[in-house]
Amino acid sequence: MRTIDLDSLDIFRAVATEGGVIRAAHKLNRVQSNVTTRIKQLEQRLGCALFRKQGRGLVLSPEGERLLSYAQRLFRIADEAESELREGRPMGVLRIGSLESTAGSRLAPILSRFHQLHPGVVVELVTGTTGALLQRVAQFEIEAAFVSEPFAADGLSTLKVFDEELVLVTAKGLPRVRRAADLAGMSMVAFAAGCSYRKRLEDWLGAGELPPARTLELASYQAMIACVAAGTGFAVVPRSLLVALRAADDVQQHELPAPVRRNRTHLVWNGTASTALLRLQDLLHATRGRAAEPAGVSARRSG
């Protein structure tokens, strides 16, 4: 029976993340020819091409994408096993994702406390829309993510962690918005498709048969709020983010209907949670003001 050793997977992962053999060789402190040979040997063993050329670099083939997903899982499990047996405490890398709003308004004190309690764990945080983060969790590119309702998480485990209040914001001086029709002729400022807050706003506008005059897609809340304050249009944001960014006085806030206003942020993950992720879940339970429970008690399996 043929096996793939972790050393070969480490070389493969380096080439994938660095985008080429030369940079991977430098990162691994190996000669370029050795890296090239090991990749060719791995491809011969698997019977498929793992990379294809793109300009001066390399990009993963569909088979390479699948192998990278498995490699990330194997390295996480290997790191966890070694740290558990040697140290008896969580160590290694915990890769998680988050909505930008959650990262900006909720996670700083939690991750700071987590670092104090578990200094052997390096947390790597990426941000994105709910749709993009769910896809990365499903593909094991990250171990877990903080996402917002509404979302479908077939096959993923979820844990409710934060309650959010969404508010509609416009430039100051505009008439009070009491219903969707009051936004007629205005532009919507939002993240790209896949943003759960945008979906909730679009559903509300759609129920009133009022599509926005146009949509301006931006990649950060700071830019969104600045555009709204300048009179570009309207947006929906968590009230906690306005407070965190000290931007509450820059825009006019309008209360949304309860079904739109009330929102929850969930932690989602794929498969068995690592020790580091379990400790993060414990901390999230404590943050919500109740004793930490085993993850399996509060978590539910979607699908």
Image: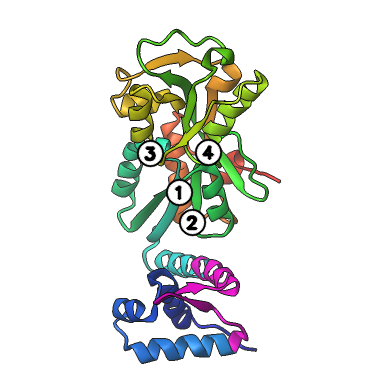
Where residue 219 appears, as percent x and y from the top left, is 41, 41
The CA distance from mark 2 to mark 1 is 7 Å
Q: Determine the secondary structure under disc 1.
A: strand
User: Foreground mark, 4 or 2?
Assistant: 4
Amino acid at circle 3: Ser
The residue to which callout 3 is attached is 220
The residue to which callout 2 is attached is 142
Residue beneath the point at 38% across and 90% down: 34
Amino acid at circle 1: Gly
* Observer-nearest of 155 and 128: 128
* Observer-nearest of 165 and 119: 165
Question: What segment is highlighted magenta in the picture?
Answer: 45-72
Residue beneath the point at 53% across and 9% down: 178
The residue to which callout 1 is attached is 97
Q: Looking at the image, do the residues carrying marks 2 and 3 touch, with CB atoms under 8 Å apart?
A: no
Q: Which mark is residue 195?
A: 4
Name the colouring of the figure: rainbow
Q: Looking at the image, do the residues carrying marks 2 and 1 touch, with CB atoms under 8 Å apart?
A: yes
Amino acid at circle 2: Ile
Where residue 18 appears, as percent x and y from the top left, is 38, 71
Where residue 46 appears, as percent x and y from the top left, is 60, 84
Crowding at mark 1 (Cα within 10 Å: few <14, some 14-19, many 20+): many
The CA distance from mark 3 to mark 1 is 15 Å
Q: Determine the secondary structure under disc 2.
A: loop
Question: Reading the chain from its start, which is encountered first: label 4 or label 2?
Answer: 2
The CA distance from mark 1 to mark 4 is 14 Å
Crowding at mark 3 (Cα within 10 Å: few <14, some 14-19, many 20+): few
Q: Residue furthest right?
A: 303
